Amino acid sequence: ATRPLIAPSILAADFARLGEEVDAIVQAGADWIHLDVMDGHFVPNISFGPQIVKALRPRTKLPFDVHLMIEPADPYLEAFAKAGADHILIHIEARPHAHRSLQQIRALGAKPGIVLCPATPPEAISEIMDMVDVILVMTVNPGFGGQKFLASQLPKISRLRDMITKSGRDIRLAVDGGIDPATAPQAIAAGADVLIAGSAIYAQPDYKAAIEALRPTG
Ligand code: DX5
Ligand code: ZN
């Protein structure tokens, strides 16, 4: 298995010092920067939009992994691509047409990703596997940081890992929600190769130690 990537979510950062908070996780050894975009409609919370992505872009060359929890997403894909998103992830549950949205993301020069909520079965994305570079399994219901990891999602991660292997394509399998030093090994054992973590990193005093604590030992 490849070494899992760590993608800190800035949702748990100090929003009054966002630029410095990005610098700090870059210094601490982050692989990707995860940016959670929420619209108060698809999810019951509002975070930030493309202006924040653009403002943070000069801070690092690390990939910006932009998780869109917005519905519809299509009217905003270009703005996020122009703002510097490297990966643009949409939810399979967000209307109206995931296939078209993924095509559009690719055409904009970004890497398309698809996200599955806890209630969604892996087969929901079987017809669009060939269009994505990232699959993200939510291990909490989207909308908030600091929620409890749903172990019920582990079999789904394994199923998706099998589907990726069968596809023969180079697709990253990410997990998001409640990832900490106790749950990270479970997600990795199930087949995840990207760990997204908000509070397990930003709520800790030492970001570097917090990132290292998520990586497999030995
Ligand atoms: C939740 C977001 C997550 C969130 C994770 O809707 O997609 O990225 O920031 O936060 P933690 O790691 O605290 O569960
Ligand atoms: Zn997220």
Image (cartoon, rainbow, N blue to C red):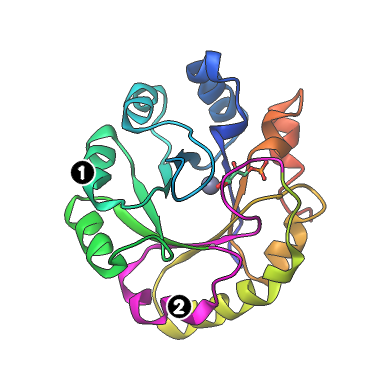
Residue indicated by mark 1: 78
Q: Quadrant of the N terminus?
A: bottom right
**Range shown magenta:** 117-146
Residue type highlighted by circle 1: Glu
Circle nearer the N terminus (2, 1)? 1
At horizontal 38% and vertical 26% (from top left) the residue drawn is: 52
Left or right relative to 35: residue 150: right
Residue indicated by mark 2: 124
Judge whether 127 appears above or below 144 on screen: below
Across and down, in percent, residue 116 comes to 51, 65
Q: Quadrant of residue 129?
A: bottom left
Outermost residue on the left side: it is: 107
Give the Cα distance between marks 2 and 1. Answer: 25 Å
CB under 8 Å between discs 2 and 1:
no
Judge whether 60 appears above or below 81 on screen: above
Q: In which quarter of the image is residue 204?
A: top right
**Is residue 66 one of those drawn in magenta?**
no
Residue type highlighted by circle 2: Ala
Across and down, in percent, residue 174 comes to 55, 59
Question: Helix, strand, or loop for circle 2?
Answer: helix
